[in-house]
Image: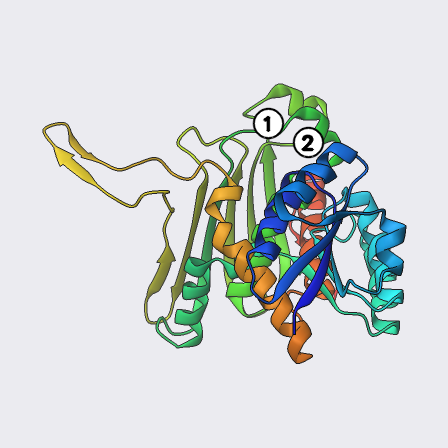
Amino acid sequence: MTVRFALLGAGRIGKVHAKAVSGNPDAVLVAVADAMPAAAEAIAKDYGCDVRTIDAIEKAGDIDAVVICTPTDTHADLIERFARVGKAIFCEKPVDLDANRVRECLKVVEDTKGKLMVGFNRRFDPHFMAVKQAIDDGAIGAVEMVTITSRDPGAPPVDYIKRSGGIFRDMTIHDFDMARFLLGEEPVAVTAHASVLVDPEIGKAGDFDSVSVILETASGKQAVISNSRRATYGYDQRIEVHGSKGMVAAENQRAVSIEIANGQGYTRPPLHDFFMTRYTEAYANEIASFIAAIEKGATITPSGKDGLAALALADAAVRSVAEKRQVRIDA
């Protein structure tokens, strides 16, 4: 079976997914839609697909699945539209910035027996998958503490900051999902601290650029997350999981993994410059998992519920900073 895809949104992340879909032997990119005709035409030219409207894609008989890469405030509406016409849906995170709107959307997916995957691509990174496999294999015993470091090489434009939902819902949300993935238990409490250390304009826009979060589970397991919008040395992505019998870690990745030793000491090439190159394999694996679930009729993960759980943690972190206290997650 070849899964026939349409891409909704031809921006930066849309280009990443167009590459992932087109590179999969079990998929074909049939159409692309974007409010900016030039962006859609560029992808159509690169991958040999049609440019169509979203309305046409909704009615199309030659499309099985859609990849939603449009602005966040359109996600929930598009998910509902395509769930109602029986097309499988892959949607970039988040489903929405409002938890109640997410719940409404997921109810439509449930009622229509829709197929929905939320784009938490880091679960599909080969290095992070190996960490999870080591945990599942019992190599480090029972998980006790998780440490996640995620720092961007530079801050996005302030105009983006203003509509992003804030650092916890835009950036840390990936780490909230990864923490849940590795802890094996749901966090029940969040303590967050946030500062503006990178760009005062981010603070003027009502957001932060440097945050630390501690998550706790009912059994006492902990996850510590460190985020910054600035890392002068590249895209900093590291994970360490400490257990009762040992530790497993995933180090930063480089475009070229070599080390040079000479009279000036030991040097290595720089880190990847951002997520488009650091997580190339993750995006490909993510789409492959979505396709496999469609073909086999299997459970799709990460699901809409995973998206809602991560958003709940982000909302709790926002409250924790505002109220300067630990926030419990509603049961």
Q: Position of residue 148 (x, y in %)?
A: 47, 51
Q: Looking at the image, which is closer to me, 277 or 75?
A: 277
Q: Position of residue 48 (x, y in %)?
A: 66, 48
Q: Three-letter amino acid code at disc 2?
A: Asp
Q: Residue at x 56, y 61 (%)?
A: 24
Of residues 149 and 92, the one drawn nearer to the viewer in this rendering: 92
In the image, which disc is placed on residue 226? none
Residue at position x 74%, y 30% in the image: 162
Q: Is residue 269 left or right of residue 161?
A: left
* Residue 246 position in % (x across, y down): 32, 67
Task: Kindly give the residue lying farthest to the left in the view shown.
Answer: 263
* Mark 1 secondary-structure assignment: loop
Kindly tell me whether residue 186 is visible in this rendering: no
Q: Which mark is residue 207?
A: 2
For the N terminus, the quadrant is: bottom right
Is label 1 in contact with label 2 (beta carbons under 8 Å)?
yes
Residue 194 picture quarter: top right
Give the answer, above or below, for where 106 lies relative to 296. above
Q: Is residue 90 above or below residue 296?
A: above
Q: Residue at x 55, y 56 (%)?
A: 23
Task: Identify the residue position indicated by label 1 in the image.
Answer: 196
Q: Secondary structure at mark 2?
A: loop
Q: Residues within 10 Å of mark 2 (few under 14, many from 20)?
A: many
Horizontal side, residue 234 vs residue 214: left or right: left
